[in-house]
Image (cartoon, grey):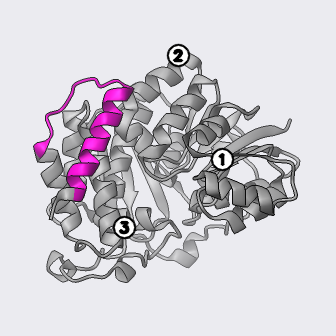
C-alpha cells in the first residue's frame, strides 16, 4: 500500500529529512503536497524529484517566481490559503507539520478537521492550543504521531503498556550549545556561539531554544497534551550524549527507554511507517563505541526558560501561548542582534507577568493573545 503524504515546512530541517526518508522508499510513499517558505531553489528541486500535485510558498511574488521556474504542472499556491490547501485539500492520509512556530496552528487544525493523521513536528501547535488540538483529533479519530525524538521515544516506550501504570516520564536534554558554561559566562555569547549545537543538526530557532532550554520547556507542555499526564509526572534530565532519547518509569519502578543515534530521520520514519518498522538510512548505535552515558540533574536556576515553561503549563489556559509567542519574538530579536542571549529569558518573564490568563480560550482568543504577546515582546528594551 502506498501512503500519501503532505509536508508543511518541506524546505526546513525536518521537512528535508522527511523527504530523505521518503526517497529511500519510493514504492511506499507518494508526496501529495509541499509547503515551503522562500527557498525557491530547494523547492524546485523537491518538485522535480517528488512530483507533488500542489505546492505552497510564502508570498504571491514567490509563487510567481516558482511558476515561472518550474516545468512541472504542479498547482502553485501561496500564503495562509495555500498552507490550508496543502494541509487539508489534498488526498494525503498523513500531514507532517514541520513549520517552526505558532503559524503551524491553523493549518494543523485544518488538517485534523479534514481527517488527516498528523506527523507532529510543530510543538508550538500543542503548546498554544493543546486543548483544542487534542479534542478535535479525538472527535475526528485522527492520530497525533510525534516526530520529535523525545516524544517519539515516549510513544514507543508506551507501546503495549497501560497509561495508568506510569509513574513518571523523563525527557532527556543534551543541554545545548552552552551546557558546560556558567550563567556568568553567558553574558556576552554570540549568535554564532549559540548556533553550534553539539549533537543535532537543526534550524536556527530550535538550536537557540536548545541553548536556553526553552525547547525542552515546549516539549514538556507538548508531552502533557500528547500523553495526558500532569506536569508532576513529567521530568527533564540532562544527557549530553543524546543516546537515550527519553524514558518511561512505571509504578513498579521498571524503566523502559528508547536509544539510538542522534538522527531525526529515525523518529520521522517511525511516524511515517507506524505501526510498522522498516530499515533506516541512519547509522546503527553501537554502545561499545559510545563507552559510557552521562546524566545530570536539571538546574532550574541555570535554565529559567524551562522553569517558566512549567509555570505556564501549570497555569494553563492562555499562558502557554504567551510563553511561546514571547519566546519566538525574543529568539528572533537575539538572532538579529537586537538583544543579548540572557535577555531572551527576561523578555519571556516580563510578557508573562503582564498577562492575565484566560482559562479555556477558543481559537480566535488564542490568536489575539498570541499577537498581543508578540507586540509586547517586540516593544521591550
Calculate the distance from the C-alpha at mark 1 to the C-alpha at mark 3. 24 Å
Between 107 and 264, the one lying in front of the other is: 107
Residue shown at the point (63%, 41%) measured from the top left: 82
Looking at the picture, how far across and down is residue 131, in whole percent?
37, 26
Label drawn at residue 139: 2
Looking at the picture, how far across and down is residue 241, in whole percent?
44, 71
Calculate the distance from the C-alpha at mark 2 to the C-alpha at mark 3. 36 Å
Q: How crowded is mark 3: few (under 14 residues within 10 Å), some or many (20 or more)?
A: many
Q: How crowded is mark 1: few (under 14 residues within 10 Å), some or many (20 or more)?
A: many
Left or right: residue 55 versus residue 159 is right
Residue bearing the label numbered 1? 7
Which mark is first along the chain, 3 or 2? 2
User: For the stretch drawn in magenta, what is the main secondary structure?
Assistant: helix
Q: Give the range drawn in magenta.
A: 354-378
Label drawn at residue 208: 3
Q: In this view, does 275 lie above or below 182?
A: above
Looking at the picture, how far across and down is residue 146, in whole percent?
53, 43
- In reply to whether residue 370 is colored magenta, the answer given is yes
Amino acid at each position: 500500500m502506498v501512503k500519501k503524504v503532505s509536508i508543511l515546512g518541506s524546505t526546513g530541517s525536518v521537512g528535508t529529512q522527511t523527504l530523505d526518508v521518503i526517497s529511500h522508499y519510493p514504492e511506499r510513499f507518494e508526496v501529495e503536497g509541499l509547503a515551503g517558505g522562500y527557498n525557491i531553489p530547494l523547492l524546485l528541486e523537491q518538485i522535480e524529484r517528488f512530483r507533488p500535485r500542489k505546492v505552497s510558498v510564502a508570498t504571491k511574488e514567490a509563487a510567481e517566481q516558482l511558476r515561472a521556474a518550474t516545468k512541472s504542472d504542479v498547482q502553485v499556491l501561496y500564503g495562509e490559503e495555500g498552507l490550508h490547501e496543502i494541509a487539508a485539500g489534498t488526498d494525503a492520509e498523513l500531514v507532517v507539520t514541520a513549520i517552526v512556530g505558532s503559524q503551524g496552528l491553523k493549518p494543523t487544525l485544518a488538517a485534523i478537521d479534514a481527517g488527516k493523521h498528523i506527523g507532529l513536528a510543530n510543538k508550538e501547535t500543542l503548546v498554544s492550543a493543546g486543548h483544542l488540538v487534542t479534542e478535535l483529533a479525538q472527535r475526528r479519530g485522527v492520530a497525533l504521531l510525534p516526530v520529535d525524538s523525545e516524544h517519539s521515544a515516549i510513544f514507543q516506550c508506551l507501546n503495549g503498556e497501560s497509561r495508568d501504570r506510569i509513574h513518571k516520564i523523563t525527557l532527556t536534554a543534551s543541554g545545548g550549545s552552552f551546557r558546560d558554561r556558567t550563567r556568568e559566562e553567558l553574558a556576552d555569547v554570540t549568535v554564532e556561539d549559540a548556533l553550534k549545537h553539539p549533537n543535532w543538526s537543526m534550524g536556527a530557532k530550535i538550536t537557540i531554544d536548545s541553548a536556553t532550554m526553552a525547547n525542552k520547556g515546549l516539549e514538556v507542555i507538548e508531552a502533557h497534551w500528547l500523553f495526558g499526564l500532569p506536569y508532576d509526572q513529567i521530568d527533564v534530565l540532562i544527557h549530553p550524549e543524546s543516546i537515550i532519547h527519553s524514558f518511561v518509569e512505571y509504578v513498579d519502578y521498571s524503566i523502559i527507554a528508547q536509544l539510538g543515534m542522534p538522527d531525526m530521520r529515525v523518529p520521522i520514519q517511525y511516524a511515517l511507517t507506524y505501526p510498522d518498522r522498516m530499515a533506516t538510512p541512519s547509522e546503527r548505535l553501537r554502545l561499545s563505541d559510545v563507552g559510557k552515558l552521562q546524566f545530570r540533574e536539571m538546574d532550574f536556576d541555570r535554565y529559567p526558560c524551562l522553569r517558566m515553561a512549567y509555570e505556564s503549563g501549570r497555569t494553563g489556559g492562555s499562558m502557554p501561548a504567551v510563553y511561546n509567542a514571547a519566546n519566538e519574538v525574543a529568539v528572533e530579536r537575539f538572532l538579529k542582534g537586537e538583544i543579548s542571549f540572557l535577555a531572551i529569558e527576561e523578555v519571556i518573564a516580563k510578557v508573562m507577568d503582564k498577562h492575565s490568563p484566560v482559562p479555556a480560550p477558543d481559537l480566535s482568543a488564542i490568536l489575539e493573545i498570541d499577537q498581543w504577546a508578540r507586540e509586547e515582546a517586540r516593544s521591550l528594551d
